[in-house]
Amino acid sequence: MSTVSIPELVADHSTLIVAGSGGVGKTTVAAALGYLAADRPDGRVLVLTVDPARRLATALGIGDVGGVPRRVDTGLRGELWVEMLDARQEWDRLISTHAPDEGVRDAVLSNHLYRHITRRFVQSHEYVAMERLHRLHTTEEWDLIVLDTPPSRNALDLLDAPARMCDFFGGRLLRWLTAPATSRFALQAFRPITLVADRILGGPFVSDLTEFFVLIKTMEKGFVERATEVEKSLSQESTNFVIVTTAERGPAGEVMRLVQELARRRCRAGVVVVNRTTPVPADDGNEASVLSVDAASRLVPDAAPAVVTAVVEMMGETLDQMRHSARAESEVLRSLPGDVPAVRVPMMDSDIADLDGIKGLARALGASVPAVT
Amino acid sequence: MPFDLIDRRLVIVTGKGGVGKSSVSAALALCASRRGRRTLVCELDAKGDLARLLGSPPVDYSGSEVRPGLVAMTMDTERSLAEYLRVQARIPFAGRIGPLARVFEFVATAAPGVRELLTMGKLAWEARRPDFDLVIADATATGHAVGQLAAPAAIRELVRLGMIRHQLDWMVEILEDPESTSAVVITTPEEMPVVETIELAEQVRNAAHIDVAAVVANRVLPAPFTVAEREIFDHLATVVGGEVGSVAAGGDEIGPEFVPAIAATSHALRRREVGSVHLSRLRAELPPGMPVLLLPELFDTPDATSGVERLAAALADESNW
């Protein structure tokens, strides 16, 4: 299995995209990678996060404020900045950039349907997260940007977002849908379909929808160019993916799919971080730990023998349980794709919810060991 | 505690990613079907975990009986649309409209609420039909949950006329009636899941207008020691920490064999202490009277199915079933 040094990985790239299943610790890993990267002179590092937990957000100084980078006071040699994505603002920026004139811009921004889509539905975050990343890059203000990806039911939705945007504009369907509004002939030809749609959705809704897409269609060129650029940037040499998982079957299975998809798109998967592994060596599955009650009694001679017995038994049981978990984990780890180096980071004693926690995780990442030995 | 979760028509299991939603959904489904409720359990994100947890080969949208009285299915919004057009809109040729898949792809891309609506619509429809007594939804992770649950009500705001308006009306009626529909929020005794659970429970009630019947804290570590035992453990840990390698009167080297067990036990104790703090916070910040059920951390289960059986036993215990 190939090896990797995480400090080198953060030093050698200008974009790291942290991907993986929900609940595996992507946000804290992203912050810790940023922390590692900021530990060099003059480094300017930005962690772009999507939905940090409140206390972590507060600790990092971003609280409820999204859309602007905030500097974190770390005392490191370089600068660590964090930004929370503001999807709504990013969509509005996109529309403002691509609208052919102020009339269209204002019509879209005030369109009921547009506001509804961009404010209520999380899926729309995936594209704008990529868009924001690209925009921040073009400012050339940052040595490294770490993107913590949005929670999605599928880690690949993010990768597909730019292509979906192109498909949407390039596809026949948008033309098809906007046709009734632009041509009398089309209006007749599509009449049966609009009748069905009207019956199901109600007339006014359909005409709102059509108006919205007629407006959107005027922005086709800009949107498609932009999405194509964003997609290209994903496979640049300076961009690398950090895949985070736990040593559980579900998230680890997702790693394989993600690695294959990245390879198919010629994107680089630099490392798999196996987070929160059990911090004891695995057992061989056969023997229970034998701890001598006599030896323990000699160490604590004043204690009641019955209590010592209970304590020693519980200690043995706890160790065995953890060794057993570690063994189950190593089975899962062996199923990870062999072509991407994997490192393991043991579970910390307490939760990571402040800068000290991030520091601890950064240290652990810096010193991480291969997941399979 | 009178707890009638399985007497609802629709139970939506939600929570942060990675906390064990599918395991708890499977356990709940087992409990309900064993108590004689004809149960449909539906995995919304189609990862296939649910079937595996129930010891079944993969299931699809049409559903398979995985245990007596228990049917499992996965959500497929495209098939939900086809079913809707055929059954509800009475457009018999819907399945044969060639570009249906393309139309659907378009609609789902253009108006992202549509997928959520088709999902919630299918659930509400199954809950309304007499085929099942109880529908359990193994729902999406927190980030999507409120958007998902509130989709019918949100779209109802947009659609004022047409056939779908009527359907949205009964959908919202089922979803917003606490006698029919409840959400259960799953968490683990850790910082982020607890904070998200407190927020989610609030949002499910106040933004999606869906009743939250209970919070389930999964993977709770049991208390290893009594107070007296803890004292001895701490003493032992101090002695070993200070005297590893020293030689006892009998001439044996004492201590080293205890080091890994003490390290493991100390780690478990610290995790438990941190977990207890989070559980107290959870109880304090949830609305008064909200039941918090505790399910144990399962260390050594030979396979996924037996883990679910143990969770089902613990769940029945916690709920006084």
Image (cartoon, helix red, strand yellow):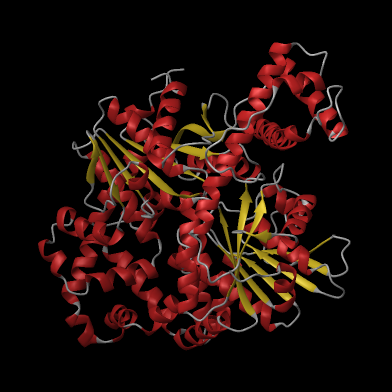
Task: State left or right for residue B306 relative to residue A4.
Answer: left
Q: Residue furthest left?
A: B92
Relative image position of residue A249 (x, y in whole percent): 47, 52
Q: Residue furthest front?
A: B251
| Relative vertical location of residue B311 with respect to residue B73 in this rendering, above or below | above
The x and y percentages for residue B119 are: 33, 53
Where is residue B200 drawn, in percent x and y?
54, 43
Q: At x 81% / y 28%, what residue is drawn?
A: B252
Residue A75 lies in quadrant:
bottom right
Seen at 66% across and 44% down, the residue is A280
Query: Does residue A267 lie above or below A58 as drawn?
Result: below
Horizontally, is B83 left or right of B23 in the view? left
Quarter where residue A315 is shown: top right
Nearer to the camera, A367 or B154: A367
- Residue A257: x and y in percent read 45, 66
Q: Is residue A63 left or right of residue B66?
A: right
Residue B108 seen: yes
A113 lies left or right of B223: left
Viewer-nearest residue: A33 or B85 = A33
Residue name at image x 85 percent, y 60 percent: A73
